[in-house]
Each structure stands twice: as C-alpha cells, then as structure tokens.
Amino acid sequence: MSEPVHLEVARGVATITLDSPTNRNALSAAVRRGLLDHLRTAIDDPGARVIVLTHTGTVFCAGMDLKEATGAGADAQGVNEFPRILATIWDSPTPVVARLAGTARAGGVGLVAACDLAIAADDVRFAFSEVRIGVVPAVISVTVLPRVQARAAHELLLTGEVFDAARAATIGLITRAVPAADLDAEVAAACEQLALGGPEALAATKQVLLRARGDDMDAEFDRMLALSARHFASEEGQEGIAAFVQKRPARWVPDGHPARGDG
C-alpha cells in the first residue's frame, strides 16, 4: 500500500501532498502520522524556504476519519493527535501555504486555518460539519477563530452549512479564491514572494503575528481537546457518526425535516 502522504522538495519549496483520495483524504491514523512526520522533516530542512500543503483527488481533507472513531472511547479518539499537527503548522518558522483544489470539511478546515496563506480554486466548498454529526468543532476552533469574522463563525460553526471559496475569502478563512485554471500559478507566485524574505526574519515575523493573537495555544488546545474527545465518544456523537457512515439521518433530525427525505 502506498504512503497516504508524500513530501517532495524542489527549488526551495517543500510540497506535502495528502494522497488518500479513496478516503477523501480523511485524517486517518496513517494520514495523521505521515502529515506530522513530513511537516517536521520540511521544517528541519534548511533548503525548504516555503511549505505547500496540497492534495490529490477532489477533496482537500474531509476531517477526522469517522470509521476509526466508531466505538472508541474519549482516550482513544484520533482527534487526540490533531492539536500537535495544527500547532506544528501554526508555529512553523517556515511559512506554510495551503493549496486547495477541492473541498475542505471539519478538521480539513482547521488545517487550512492553521496555514499562513491559503489559496483556493473558486469552485471549492467548505463546511464546519461537526454539529451535524453530534460532535464539536472544538480543536479546530483554536486555529479557525483567530482567522474568521465573529458573526460568520457563529453562523457557520452552529449551522454546519456549506459555503463557497468567495465567502471563505471574505470572512478571512482563506487568503483568496482564484479561477481553478490559475490556482497553480497563484500558489507558485505566493511561494516566490515568500522566498524573497530572509528565513530568520520570516520566522521572527511569524512570532510577532502569533503573539498578537493573545491566548496560550497549548493551554487552549488542552481545553478544546478534552471537549472534542468527550463529544466524539458520547452517545450523541457515536449516533451521529453511525448515521454518517450508514448514510441515514441522525435520530435527532425532526420528523418531516427535508434531511429525512420526507419534507
């Protein structure tokens, strides 16, 4: 079986590719492990001036692997490993650019928010889908809330509705939305601009930007991780995950609601 995450370094750009398209690049144990290992390798490589996080297939990342979450207690949920990935991207002294040619959901949106720049094709769609399966977007809130306008965050995290790349740019989740045909050129141009900065100056400037955000990220991740893992393992969370896997409405969806197919 091929590795689900790849790293390639060329001309000063370290490209990390999520390559598990049959699983919608969900954050399985193998993807989490490969992503974290390659992030650390790229950060430690003095020849890598910029890191690009990208994907194969039509989905950038669908969030946590819900099949792996089924039946697991709070201590065994894969989400427990996710804060270290987000913090590694957020704190990386090497600038990280997200390249999105496909959908991002839930934890995938958290990855996007953790990156310094995020450039998406204008046909890409996003959603904070957690509440619809009875779990909480707690861990990703640590990277999402500093980026996204407050009113938009309330609407989108509470409803789980799908929104497009244009709105993602307007609310601050991504840097910009571009025509799909221009995506690679725009990402390359951003990498070229970032490479003009001195590596030490870029790392120090990132620290200035991060300090301006205030809260202790490690402490916040600890609080949000406990909340997230508890809901993943809860009766409601397990019902929502089962409903998603079985492609049926969750028990809490009201009778007559369109999601049940009878409205």
Image: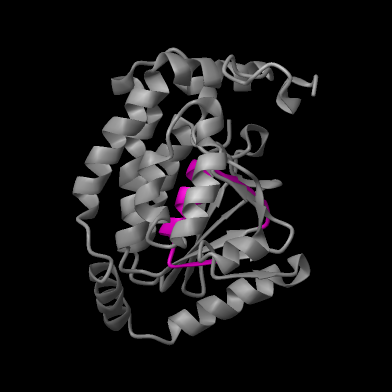
Quadrant of residue 225 in the image?
top left
Tally of marks: 0
Query: Furthest residue to the right?
Result: 262
Quarter of the figure with the N terminus: top right
| Residue drawn at x 71%, y 24% as measured from the top left | 257
| Residue drawn at x 68%, y 17% as measured from the top left | 248
- Res 100 visible: yes
Give the colouring mode of the picture: one colour
Quarter of the figure with the C terminus: top right
**Image x and y of residue 47, in percent:** 39, 72
Q: Report the side of 53 relative to 201 (left or right).
A: right
Magenta stretch contains residue 160: no
Placement of 228 over or under 122, stated as above or below: above
In this rendered view, identify the residue nearer to me: 192 or 98: 98
Q: Report the side of 86 relative to 164 (left or right).
A: left
**Image x and y of residue 5, in percent:** 52, 45
| Residue drawn at x 59%, y 80% as measured from the top left | 189
Placement of 241 over or under 21, stated as above or below: above
- Res 40 visible: no
Magenta stretch contains residue 108: yes
In this rendered view, identify the residue nearer to me: 55 or 245: 245
**Image x and y of residue 16, in percent:** 50, 55
**Image x and y of residue 228, in percent:** 36, 32
Placement of 182 over or under 57, stated as above or below: below
Q: Report the side of 173 relative to 205 (left or right).
A: right
| Residue drawn at x 56%, y 16% as measured from the top left | 242
Task: Give the magenta range.
Answer: 101-118
